[in-house]
Image (cartoon, rainbow, N blue to C red):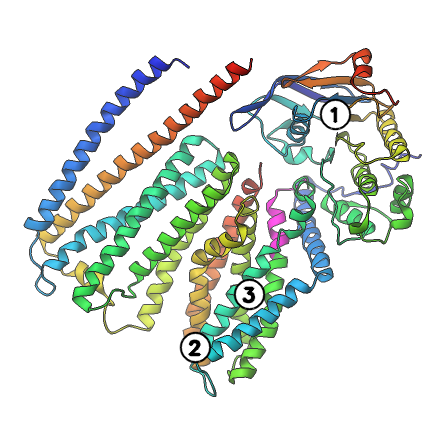
Amino acid sequence: MSDERDVMSRQTSKPGQDALSSYVQVVGAVAWKDALTNSRNPEALLVMIVFSLLSLLIYAFAFGLEGEVAPGIGAGMLWMTFAFAGILGFYRIMASERESGCLDGLLLAPVDRSAIFFGKWIGGFLHLLLIAVVLVPALAAFFGLPLLLWKSALVVVLFAAGYAALGTLLAAMTLKTGAREILLPLLLLPPAFPILLAATQATRALLMGAEWHALAIWVRVLVACDAIFLTLAWMVYDRLLLE
Amino acid sequence: MIEICDLEKRFSRRPILSSLSLTAAPGEVVLIVGRNGSGKTTLLRVMAGLTGFQAGSLTIAGCILPSDAITLRRHIGFLSHQIQLYGDLTVAENMQFFNRLHGRRLSAAQLDSLLDRVGLLMWRDEHVRHFSRGMLQRLDLARVHMAQPDVLLLDEPGTGLDDDGLAILSGILNEASGQGRVVLMTSHQDGQVKAVTRRLLLEKGSLHALSTHRAGKMSGDVG
Amino acid sequence: MDISRESRKDRNNTDGLILLAAAAGLSFLIALLVVLFYAPREQVMGDVQRIFYFHVAAGWVGGLAYGIAAVCGARYLWKPHESFDDAGHAAVEIGFVFTLINVLTGSIWARPIWNTWWTWDPRLVTATVMAVMYAGYLLLRRSISNVESQRRIAAGYALLSFLSVPMTFLSIRLFRTIHPVVFGTVMQGDAMTGLSNRMLVSLAVSLLSFSFLFVVFLLYRIRLSQLSRQVEDAQWERFEAEKA
């Protein structure tokens, strides 16, 4: 058997560049792997989408809505549904690792483990966007709400970024608990309060036809929260996964 | 290549490893035997940097733990008790993933020859979920062997392997040894693998040399 | 472990703690007297307003405790040492109680004044969210059996949840400035701006007393953790000795 060492290509660049490109490569690899796994198990995503549509119908009946819907209620429905449907997705973030006992494989990647966080975060983020892609048009259609604007998309994207950061972080924290299903929502929603409030108010302003300035305040809140959560996750994730 | 001195490892306050010392030079294939619960897995995990330790010094492939933990991961291959493969991915995708994780590229031809080596070539595009334990073990071995790391840490690598599988394992160990790499493997019974150059017993938290006579008494000598 | 030496050392510590506890108790009595008799009767709200002094003090302790828990959490994650975890855990347990007191007194205060059990005051809502996060922390700890993991993950959650508190408060306040509510809005705002000197003194006394109480409770709780660890260690040693 010939010595395969020389044949396998390794990256041969400067140490700093090397570390960064390894890091980015791990992020990409984790995101790719999760995307593949999820695409082969689309049931979870479908359940989340169906669940969110169902929630809309239930809200409509519960609030006795027909015809015009007040902006506050419309915004509330969107974000409550989104928040709860999103939680279902966070259960699945570490699912393939938990099933196969595969965490060691990831933990042995030769990079800072926050790379695993970012890889998983991308997956969580995309999951939320996929729900939004169905939910927002549905809401617009069912209740005649002018939601199909780029401003809506901006709010959704910013919320999803922060919410996915929290969800991914908490998925790691609840990995070792016995009562994951009950604890995750309880632990996730209070810290998510500011982004939920900001997203709801931004959407409400949007639905009332307010000018950009009214929205911009809440957009700034979202950006600030996202930055804080992502920075915290980056600094702390490595420690959370130790044994 | 491996230098461990007076290692102490406790879980809560239960001591698992105490005053454990070990040196291993390039080319050695060290087998560590011990009863279930003796701490073999813990020892390997400490060496891989997956879990911390309370006292002692640990230098592997020139990397000092715990400060050089990240660099160390470039030099080791770790075969865990649990199969580190993703059921929803095919064999090829699994291998590709782990390569990307470690910043390596594997051409299709190289992958094919690797899989052929472990007898799994015809399963290349099958989802791993349907594999038997023995097949999974072979694939995991291939995963660890892929990068030809300086140090191989194998936790009960013979699990689930039939005679052919064990022959493949021996071949890999011989190759590693011949290339000047170090292999540290554990087992709860001796005698399965022929390539071993040194045998140690893990008992009461530290390592003791094991004579071949005693090794023979522990289980039927198959090798 | 030399039991007699340990218990002698511990008795010295206990003596110190008992003195401290007595002093804290005394300070609380003083605060009570000050609030009930020295503080002036508020013009609009009457004697009910006196609860404000303890409401604010409890809120202050709740926030302080959370800050301590977060700092201990961060320190623990950086370099694990069990004393930081002890302190953080103790801070959360105690802070939880004080935050509940804050919320309840806020509710009790609101009822006779504004005829409602709840006002959407930013501070009250934030305190409630904090109380839920405190509870979450404690439940999270109980659900993880491995001790080291429990400490690390609890530290992480303390840090995460603490960071969200100012953002929660600011976003609610922003919401309230955009959408002011007719009653119960500036409950504390009103109370804080028009404070006479005697009110300020009463508030200061109250704050000091509650802080003192908090510190005493914290020290006792940390000591409890340490003692319980010593007991477990002793049990282990005996177990190991019997085995050999």
| Near-viewer residue (A243 or A24) | A243
Contact (CB < 8 A) between labels 1 and 2? Answer: no
Q: Is residue B34 left or right of residue A68?
A: right
The answer to whether residue B123 is above or below residue A162 is above
Category of crowding for the residue at label 3, using alpha-carbon neighbours closer than 10 angstroms: few (below 14), some (14–19), many (at least 20): many
Residue indicated by mark 1: B188
Quote the CA–CA distance across marks 1 and 2: 64 Å
SS label for mark 3: helix
Ranked by sequence position, the earlier of labels 3 and 2 is 2
Residue depicted at 76% across the width and 27% down the height: B185
Which quarter of the rendering shows the N terminus of chain C?
top left
Amino acid residing under circle 2? Ile
Would you say the magenta stretch is mainly helix, strand or loop? helix
Mark 1 secondary-structure assignment:
loop
- Residue C30, position as x, y percentages in the image: 11, 41
Using the image, name the chain to which the residue with label 1 belongs.
B
Quarter of the image where one finds residue A90:
bottom right
Mark-to-mark CA distance, 3 and 2: 18 Å
Residue that badge 2 annotates? A73
Q: Give the range drawn in magenta.
A: A110-121
